[in-house]
Image (cartoon, grey):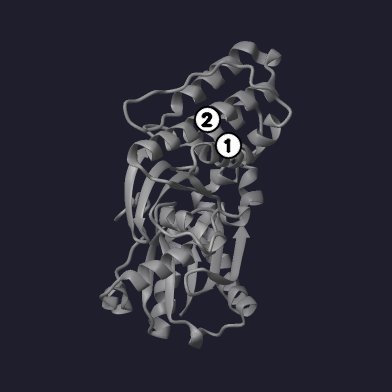
Amino acid sequence: MIGLVIESSCDETSVAIIKGGREILSNIVSSQIEIHKQFGGVVPEIASRHHVTNISYVVEEALTEANITFDELEYIGVTYGPGLVGALLVGVSYAKSLAYALNIPIVPVHHIEGHIAANYISHPDLKPPFLALVVSGGHSHLIHVTEYTKLQIIAKTRDDAVGEAFDKVARTLGLQYPGGPEVSKLAESGKDTYKLPKSKFDNYDFSFSGIKTAVINLVHKEGINVRREDMAKSFEVNVVETLVEHTMNAMIDLNIDTVVLAGGVAANTYLRKHLISEANRNNFKSYIPALEYCTDNAAMIASAAYYNYVSEKDKSKYDILNNLDLNAKANLKIGG
C-alpha cells in the first residue's frame, strides 16, 4: 500500500511517499527558516505564499526520488490541523484536488499524531501502548497511546508550551530564531547557577510561563552583567528536568512501562539524554525519533495516515466524495 502525504502546517512544505506504515520511499522538506529568520519568527502570510509556490515542485521531487508514478498511489494523506490556517489550507486544497483527480481516498491527519508516529519510522519494533511526551512550539503534552489511533491526554501545559518558552528566552538573550537550538548551543558552555522557579500541580500538568518570566526579569535586572551561557543552561536544565520528572511520575502512577519522545523540542540533546537516563533508572523502555523526524516533515504524517487508514473498518469514510468539504482546522484538538 503506497501513499503520498503532505505536511504544510507551518513553514515547511513537505511531501513523503510511504509504503506500508514504516517504509519511507522519499521525504522531501522545503524549509523557510532562512526566510523568516529576518523577522524573528514565522510570518503566516509569507509562509502561505511560499507553500503555494513550492508544493507542486516538492510533490514532483518526492515522486521522482521514490521512483513512483501517480498511478501507483492508493491514497493521499494530509495534515489538516493544528497549525497556521493559511499554510494548512494550501496542503489540504492540494491534497483534495490530487485525490479527486486520481479518484483515490484522502486521509486527514492530526499534526501531533504525526509527531508521535515519527517513532514508528525510527523504531520498527515499537507498538502501542506507551506514554508519549510531546514537546513542541505549541504543545507540551503527556499522551497515553493505547492503540495506533486511540490517544488519551494525561497532562498538558496550562500556559506557554515548552518550545514557545525556549523562543521567548532566546529573544531575551539576544539569540536568533529559531530559539530552541540557539539556547541549547549557548547552554553547552554554561553552568546551572541561576535559581529558577518550577511550577507544581496536583496532577502531571506543565507550566512554563513562570520560568520564562523569571528569566526575562533576571536578564533585565542584571543587564550587561548577566551570564548568558549560565542563564541558558539553568533554563534548559530546569525545563528538561520538569518535563522528565512529570513523565516518570505519570508512568509510575499509571503503570506504563514504555515512553516515547515526540515534537520539535525532541531534538534537544539534553532532553534526549535525560529522558533515556531516567527511563533506564526506573527500568522503563524509551524510544526517541531520529533527529530528521523531530522537526516538521511529511514522513511522520505519512506513518500516522497509514495507521488511520488501515484501522478504519469502514474505508468509505475516506472516499474523496465524502471529504470534499475537508477544511483546515488551526486549533484542532487531539482526538478530533
Type of amino acid under label 2: Glu
Residue 189 occupies quadrant: top right
Q: Which mark is residue 274?
A: 1
- How far apart marks 2 and 1 lie (CA) works out to 8 Å
Q: Which mark is residue 206?
A: none
Q: Earlier in the sequence, mark 2 or mark 1?
A: 2
Q: Is residue 42 visible?
A: no
Per the image, label 1 sits on a secondary structure element best described as helix
As rendered, which of 129 and 222 lies closer to the eye? 129
Compared with 61, 227 (above or below) is above
Q: Are marks 2 and 1 in contact (CB under 8 Å)?
A: yes
Packing grade of label 2 (10 A; few <14, some 14-19, many >=20) is some
Quadrant containing the C terminus is bottom left
Count of numbered labels shown in the rendering:
2
Type of amino acid under label 1: His
Disc 2: which residue: 241
x then y, percent, for residue 187: 68, 30
As rendered, which of 134 and 232 lies closer to the eye? 134
Residue in view at x 49 percent, y 74 percent: 4
Query: Quick check: 302 left or right of 27?
Result: left
Compared with 219, 285 (above or below) is below
**Extreme bottom residue here?**
71
**Extreme front residue here?**
283
x then y, percent, for residue 132: 43, 47
Residue in view at x 55 percent, y 85 percent: 69
Residue in view at x 45 percent, y 45 percent: 134
